[in-house]
């Protein structure tokens, strides 16, 4: 019964990715997105591999009517001519054997020759741009490359060939980036997913994958996605935000951060709740900084994102089924296995299904200080979600028993939210304190109060203490010798106006 996959909401996706197996890229993973190993050469788009002249490579022909804003038709025309000359000259299967840098050099040399021989009138800058463009098409992720290279972008969302959105600083904006057509877009998606040994086409139109730099990718192709392939990339941030940075951004106040540090340090069991992209994983990563270096920590994730600084860490990752539908390892498998690995704390990147029960078990059987994130919009909803996820595991326990288990396991729920102005804030630090009859009782320690809006549409608010001087976890704080620090932080919060 536990083998059944959770399917509670639209958010559920095939978890995780596995390391490249069937289609290893030539030079192994690299953090540099621009020259990251490209599977392109190993899985060239069919049209390109056959070395046909330009009319046989429609995906590189210009689209006269729908031209990118800043590029003229003649640019595409030139590019298309250079491109067809290039594939006449070069043997793509030979190119496949080169490492990405050498392949780039090779293409660069030939393209320069072609431009010289055919006598195209171009400035050096135009020539450089063309070169870059062609290299990206042949070796890389085409029009996505400039977006992948920008570190400040958090998400890239492609809705068919002509609509590309990005999220920067919490705001979603449209870019002028276009794919030539849906075929080019699908080819690039294919390149991405083939790196993790998967494929995407009409017969398997949904696919999760990962870029070599750790960015998470989801592809959903037609016919499921009606207006062309939809590609979503959650970019991997190499430098994770720290709690101090979150304070600087106003995600939490100075004193609120102090409370969080204590909560992490004194081994409260924590659930971080929040919507997609609200900053759950970032926050989880921050909290792990306050774990003692001596503790043995095991992390379970769909795709390794956490960056723990402690030396004694075992990192585990789930695995989707392969093309034959075999070999899947679920989050639940991992969490269960974890319990046999003598962990002191268990950290689950994203709790989505019945593994919640195993995590709760861990929390109340001596693995204090375990943590996980759950997709929900308030601490109360988070508790409901936990109950629902336990039911997904097939347990038919009385509701009251389930709630008692939850109360006995979870100490703190931290709510993260992305507000309407794009800012990300911690909106609640809430304690789970007990039961009254059949109802779980919680109390908020810290809340974010929105007071209004400035002239730029940015929300003005403040983190406030709810005036609880002695939180439920007071005894625990005292046990770790942190009670006076806790009292000071809560008191300061009550007085402060930041
Ligand atoms: N407080 C914050 N201020 C600004 N950016 C943030 C903040 N918290 C998270 N981010 C950024 O938002 C993006 C999504 O965060 P993430 O933690 O992955 O969200 P989630 O796990 O909830 O989907 C990341 O790029 C992250 O760096
Ligand atoms: Mg996350």
Image (cartoon, grey):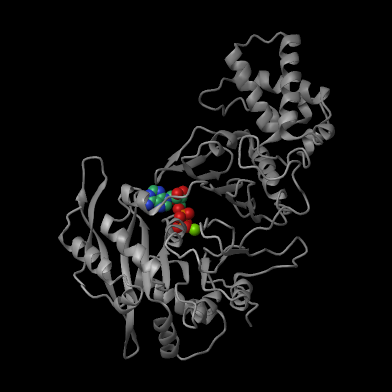
Residue 452 image point, x, y percent: 20, 51
Is 150 placed left or right of 190 in the picture? left
Where, quadrant-wise, is the N terminus in this rendering? bottom right
Residue 7 in the image: state x and y as whole percent.
56, 71
Closest to the observer: 180 or 389? 389
Taking depth in this image into account, of 96 and 253 the one nearest to the observer is: 253
Please name whichever residue, 479 or 493, is drawn nearer the observer in this view of the structure: 479
Image side of residue 425 versus residue 344, left or right: left
Quick check: can you spot residue 7? Answer: yes
Q: 219 or 443: which is nearer to us?
A: 443
Q: Vertically, is 53 above or below 319?
A: above
Residue occupying image coordinates x 21% and y 68%: 466
Query: Is 68 drawn above or below residue 424 in the view shown?
Result: above
Q: Position of residue 381 (x, y in %)?
A: 38, 72
Q: Quadrant of residue 261?
A: bottom left
- Looking at the rendered structure, the number of numbered marks drawn on it comes to 0
Q: Residue at x 59, y 58 (%)?
A: 303
Using the image, determine if residue 162 lies above or below residue 307. above
* Residue at image coords 62%, 11%: 122
Q: Residue at x 58, y 15 (%)?
A: 125
């Amino acid at each position: 019964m536990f083998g059944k996959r959770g399917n509670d909401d639209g958010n559920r996706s095939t978890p995780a990715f596995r390391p490249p197996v069937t289609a290893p890229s030539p030079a192994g993973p690299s953090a540099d997105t621009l020259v990251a190993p490209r599977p392109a050469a190993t899985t060239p788009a069919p049209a390109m591999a056959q070395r046909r002249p330009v009319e046989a490579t429609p995906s590189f022909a210009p689209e006269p009517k729908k031209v990118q804003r800043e590029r003229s038709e003649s640019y595409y025309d030139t590019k298309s001519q250079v491109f067809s000359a290039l594939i006449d000259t070069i043997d793509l299967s030979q190119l496949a054997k080169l490492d990405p840098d050498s392949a780039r050099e090779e293409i660069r040399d030939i393209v320069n020759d072609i431009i010289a021989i055919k006598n195209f009138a171009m400035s050096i800058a135009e020539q450089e741009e063309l070169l870059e463009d062609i290299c990206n098409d042949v070796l890389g992720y085409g029009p996505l490359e400039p977006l992948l290279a920008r570190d400040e972008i958090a998400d890239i969302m492609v809705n068919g060939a002509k609509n590309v959105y990005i999220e920067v600083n919490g705001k979603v904006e449209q870019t002028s980036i276009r794919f030539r057509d849906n075929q080019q877009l699908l080819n690039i998606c294919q390149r991405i997913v083939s790196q993790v040994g998967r494929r995407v086409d009409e017969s398997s139109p949904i696919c999760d994958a990962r870029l070599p730099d750790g960015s998470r990718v989801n592809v959903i192709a037609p016919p499921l996605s009606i207006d062309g392939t939809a590609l979503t990339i959650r970019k991997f941030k190499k430098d994770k935000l720290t709690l101090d940075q979150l304070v600087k951004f106003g995600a939490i106040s100075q004193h609120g951060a102090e409370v969080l540090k204590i909560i992490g340090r004194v081994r409260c069991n924590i659930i971080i709740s929040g919507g997609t992209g609200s900053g759950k994983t970032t926050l989880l990563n921050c909290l792990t900084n306050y774990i003692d270096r001596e503790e043995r920590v095991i992390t379970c994730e769909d795709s390794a994102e956490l960056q723990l600084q402690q030396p004694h860490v075992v990192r585990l990752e789930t695995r989707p089924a392969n093309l034959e539908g075999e070999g899947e390892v679920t989050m639940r498998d991992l969490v269960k296995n974890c319990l046999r690995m003598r962990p002191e704390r268990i950290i689950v990147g994203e709790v989505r299904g019945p593994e919640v029960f195993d995590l709760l078990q861990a929390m109340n059987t001596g693995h204090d200080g375990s943590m996980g994130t759950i997709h929900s919009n308030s601490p109360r909803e988070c508790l409901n979600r936990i109950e629902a996820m336990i039911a997904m595991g097939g347990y038919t326990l009385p509701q009251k028993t389930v709630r008692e288990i939850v109360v006995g396991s979870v100490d703190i729920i931290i709510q993260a939210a992305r507000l309407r102005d794009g800012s990300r804030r911690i909106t609640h630090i809430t304690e789970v304190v007990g039961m009254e009859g059949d109802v779980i009782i919680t109390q908020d320690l810290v809340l974010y109060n929105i007071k209004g809006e400035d002239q730029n549409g940015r929300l003005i608010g403040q983190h406030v203490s709810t005036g609880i001087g002695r939180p439920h976890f007071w005894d625990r704080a005292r046990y770790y010798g942190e009670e006076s620090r806790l009292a000071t932080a809560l008191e300061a919060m009550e007085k402060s106006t930041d």
